[in-house]
Amino acid sequence: MEDQEVERVKKFLNANGYLVRKSDLAWILNQMAEALDRQVEEASGIVVRQLICEVITTGKEVKVITELPGVCEERIKMNVYDNELEVNAENEKRTYYEIIYFPAEADTRVFKSTFLNGLLEVRFEKKNNKKRGHHKITSLSPSASSGSKG
């Protein structure tokens, strides 16, 4: 809800003896809007909601894990762009759609995905994922380099 609308309602309520704060009023109106959205979704028979997802970056890869309850694997569609994964899935009662952003260091040319028990996991290797060598630091003291004692 717009700040101007919230302010107008606040002024109206205050003028009629109801003392409310702007933050409380905004919260109440947002709750009402969400409840109305749920009613519309229930009436249409299709529920649209944001996916719960997690992006995990490790030394070797970037993993995107998201939940898709009640969806079968055949009804999941994914598109990968520069640094985003578009997921669209549906069943008879629900439609899930989300664009998930991940770090640009993920190599999106090749990825692996698995789907098990309503969880979709997509793995991307990191770009320039080369193993780093270990370097040994040697002492530069005169006794270590000459091999003789004092």
Image: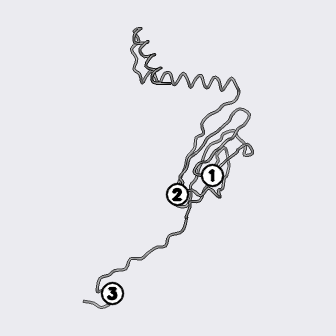
How far apart are labels 2 and 3 at the CA level?
40 Å
Which residue position holds label 3?
A: 145
Amino acid carrying label 1: it is Val
Residue occupying image coordinates x 70% and y 45%? 77
Q: Counting other residues with Cα less than 10 Å from the Cα at mark 3, is it few (<14), some (14-19), or many (20 or more)?
A: few
Identity of the amino acid at label 3?
Ser
Residue type of the residue flagged with mark 2: Thr
Residue at 70% from the left image edge and 44% from the top image edge? 76
Mark 1 lies on residue: 122
Which residue in the structure is indicated by mark 2?
58
Between discs 2 and 3, the one toward the N terminus: 2
Q: Position of residue 96 (x, y in %)?
A: 65, 38
The tag earlier along the polypeptide, 1 or 3, is 1
Q: Residue at x 60, y 39 (%)?
A: 51
Q: How far is mark 1 from mark 3, CA to CA? A: 52 Å
Label 1 environment density (alpha carbons within 10 Å; few <14, some 14–19, many ≥20): some
Q: Between disc 1 and disc 2, whose residue precedes?
A: 2
Q: Is residue 78 left or right of residue 148?
A: right
- Secondary structure at badge 2 equals loop
Residue reaching furthest to the top: 16
Q: Are marks 1 and 2 in contact (CB under 8 Å)?
A: no
Above/below status of 2 relative to 104: above
**Which residue occupies the extreme left position in the image?**
150
Query: How many numbered markers are drawn?
Result: 3
Q: Quadrant of residue 111?
A: bottom right
Residue at left 72%, top 37%?
Answer: 91
Residue 138, located in which quarter of the rendered image? bottom left
Q: Secondary structure at mark 1?
A: strand
Q: Residues within 10 Å of mark 2 (few under 14, many from 20)?
A: few
| Colour scheme shown | one colour
